[in-house]
Amino acid sequence: MEKETKKKKKTNPKDEEISLLEATVEELNDKYLRLYSEFDNYRRRTLKEKNDLSKTAAEDIMVSLLPVLDDLERALKSTLRSADDQEVVSKEGLVLIYQKFNSLLAQKGLEPITAMGETFNVDFHDAITNIPAPSEEMKGRVVEEVERGYQLNDKVIRYAKVIVGS
């Protein structure tokens, strides 16, 4: 009887080889799945980086156009203050140019940063100076906007230069 149990415990060399091959297949399959996952993550990451790059590719151009936009705003303000009726045509033309230029920049993802009356936020505002607040509720808030700030696709490309009430 003991001989029969010993024979049963003895394993077949083919069974050992099969189990070894199955373990190798499992290991190789695991390596394949990990490699596939790494490649898929790499592909997603590069696509995201490519999209981010294309969104901010126009940043240099936008930054160089901002002084032109500022000059147009100043010219528009000074022209609108004029009481001379003969300048009405140039006022209308200037307004149209400003609106067209502004809408073009907005289509490209440029947005002005709201500053007037807002709570001072270092993420969007650059404080030039502090002045006494005209009222209690204006303490810590933007009292005057010296230069408008802009975001390009939710990234600040120029901080708003402001005067803060204290």
Image (tube, rainbow, N blue to C red):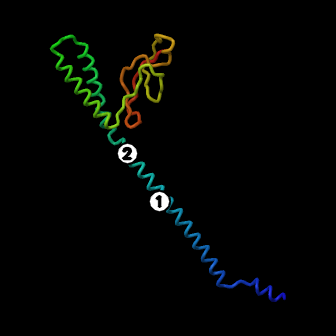
Left or right, residue 126 beside residue 79: right
Find residue 53 and name its label. 2
Where residue 59 sits, quadrant-wise, is top left
Residue drawn at x 37%, y 29% as measured from the top left: 112
Q: Could you tell me the amino acid type at mark 2?
A: Leu
Closer to the camera in the image, 27 or 106: 106
* Nearer-N-terminus badge (1/2): 1
Quickly name the residue at label 1.
Answer: 39
Left or right, residue 122 beside residue 88: right
- The mark tally for this picture is 2
State which quarter of the image contains the N terminus: bottom right
Q: Do the residues labelled 1 and 2 touch (CB within 8 Å)?
A: no
Label 1, label 2: how many angstroms apart (C-alpha)? 21 Å
| Label 2 environment density (alpha carbons within 10 Å; few <14, some 14–19, many ≥20) | few
Give coordinates of residue 38: x percent, y percent.
50, 58
Residue drawn at x 32%, y 40% as measured from the top left: 58
Q: Could you tell me the amino acid type at mark 1?
A: Phe
Please, is residue 139 above or below residue 14 in the view?
Answer: above
Give coordinates of residue 148: x percent, y percent.
36, 25
Give coordinates of residue 30: x percent, y percent.
56, 66
